[in-house]
Image (cartoon, rainbow, N blue to C red):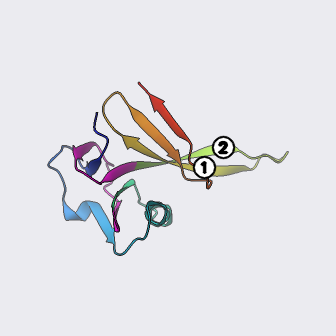
Amino acid sequence: LVAEAACRGAHVNDNQAAYFKVMENTGSIDECKQSCREEAACQGIEFAGTHCEVWVRPEGIEAVKPLSNSKCLKYSAGTVPSTTATTESTTATTMTTTESTTTTTVLTMASTTESVTTTE
């Protein structure tokens, strides 16, 4: 299992600068997630300390490379029915960390509570 990893493109050595935007002096992983939410083309984030990369590669993040103190989170948006009686819906967003080909951790970005689901 890879507990700490950096985001990559098509393979573990695919890390072209055009794939991401660096957000300088990001104070927390939550701030990095917010930068992703604000970027229409965001596919996910890589976060390490105060270094935040918002990944905008159209094909998304397809690989990760083990790297200490780094987190690679994939972004996906889904629709969740609203609590009102109308046909409106609200958008829920999730960040997914792929730790290996068999384990996925899902972090819900829509609330202040982090929901973690692990499947094996």
Q: Is residue 59 left or right of residue 38?
A: left
The amino acid type, in three-letter code, at marker 1 is Ala
Which numbered disc covers residue 19?
A: none
Q: Secondary structure at mark 2?
A: strand
What residue would you read off at disc 2? Answer: 80
Distance from Cα at disc 1 to Cα at disc 2: 6 Å
Residue 85, placed above or below residue 23: above
The amino acid type, in three-letter code, at marker 2 is Val
Q: Position of residue 52 (x, y in %)?
A: 35, 65
Q: Going from the N terminus, do you reach mark 1 or mark 2 first?
A: 2
Q: Is residue 57 left or right of residue 36?
A: left
Residue 23, placed above or below residue 113: below
- Please give the range of residues in magenta: 49-73
**Which residue is drawn at the image coordinates 41% and 58% (left, top)?**
42
What residue would you read off at disc 1? Answer: 92
Residue 6, placed above or below residue 62: below
Nearer-the-camera pick, 59 or 100? 100
Place residue 119 in its image quadrant: top left
Q: Are marks 1 and 2 in contact (CB under 8 Å)?
A: yes
Nearer-the-camera pick, 21 or 116? 116
Nearer-the-camera pick, 92 or 115? 115
Q: What is the residue that sits farthest to the top in this orientation?
A: 120
Query: Within the magenta stretch, is there residue 62?
Result: yes
Q: Position of residue 88 (x, y in %)?
A: 75, 50
Q: Is residue 114 left or right of residue 10?
A: right
**Which residue is drawn at the image coordinates 51% and 35% (left, top)?**
117
Label 2: few (<14), some or many (≥20) within 10 Å?
A: few
Label 1: few (<14), some or many (≥20) within 10 Å?
A: some
